[in-house]
Image (cartoon, rainbow, N blue to C red):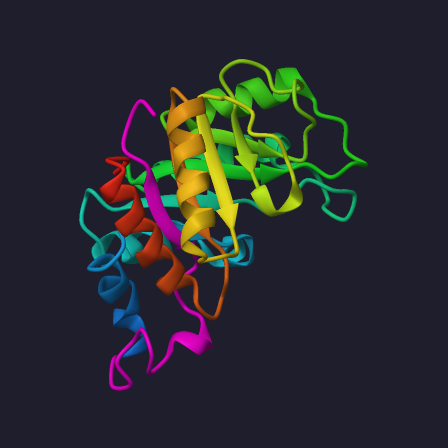
Amino acid sequence: METPLLIGTYGWAHPAWNSVFYDPDLPPEWRLSWYANHLRAVMVPAQSWPTLDVAAVSTLLDDTDETFRFVIELPPADRQNAKPPWEDSDRIATRVRAFAGQADAVLLSLADSVAPEWPALERFRAALHPAALCLDGLAAGQLPAGFGSCWCPAKDQPLVPSDYTITCCDSGEPRLLRKIIEALQRELSGRGALILTDTVRGYEHAHEARIIAELLEAT
């Protein structure tokens, strides 16, 4: 890969982590600071988006240092939403820019029922820059140049080379993690993030992945 691989988890406020990853006496508002001392990236889940205003983003930045990175998951583009995210690009871009350079990528899932509107998506991608816009739900070969992709090995998806690749994995099995990291090193020339999605043991999986990546010189 062109740059070091980011490794983090899907969110940081999971009840199963209390008294295991987080000290039982640690106040909830200090958890992200604790997390950032152990891992250097995190995906902000889509369910957090409605409350992720500029003030909330400022709090996240106060709890991390300038080298910590966020990957932001948007609500999916589907028929249940009033309008697709690219039709609200100015408001979304304002929130992403509030991360002051700590937003590394934005993930948008496209439902099968939603046809990509490429001119609008291209404008949306430009508005989010320098954060990468990664699209999930497209078949291999449908991704235009400049867009990032999402790879989920458990779904037998192909690894599509792109400017930025978000890899989602729910396993902490060392051999699988090594296989994934080696594939990213071998196939990709751009940036990327490995997100461990298990909400019970994700922090353990991320720690294991970080050790493997360091041994493989991927971080």
Q: Is residue 93 above or below residue 57?
A: above
Residue sitting nearer the eye, 6 or 63: 6
Q: Image quadrant for the N terminus?
A: top left
Residue sitting nearer the eye, 58 or 164: 164
The answer to whether residue 94 is visible is no
Q: Is residue 14 magenta?
A: yes
Left or right? Give the position of 107 relative to 32. right
Left or right? Give the position of 194 relative to 37. right
Q: In which image quadrant can residue 24 be found?
A: bottom left
Q: Position of residue 156 (x, y in %)?
A: 65, 40
Please give the name of the residue rendered at 29% of the width and 58% of the height, measured from the top-left corner: 59
Instruction: State which region is magenta.
Output: 1-26
Q: Position of residue 190 (x, y in %)?
A: 38, 22
Q: Position of residue 26 (x, y in %)?
A: 25, 80
Q: Is residue 217 magenta?
A: no
Residue sitting nearer the eye, 35 or 117: 35
Q: Position of residue 181 (x, y in %)?
A: 40, 38
Q: Tag count in the figure?
A: 0
Q: Main secondary structure of the magenta part?
A: loop
Please give the name of the residue rendered at 23% of the width and 66% of the height, measured from the top-left corner: 34
Q: Is residue 25 above or below residue 133?
A: below
Q: Image quadrant for the C terminus?
A: top left
Residue sitting nearer the eye, 50 or 148: 148
Please give the name of the residue rendered at 46% of the width and 24% of the height, measured from the top-left corner: 127
Q: Residue furthest bottom?
A: 25
The answer to whether residue 16 is visible is yes
Q: Residue furthest front?
A: 175
Q: In which image quadrant can residue 172 be found?
A: bottom left
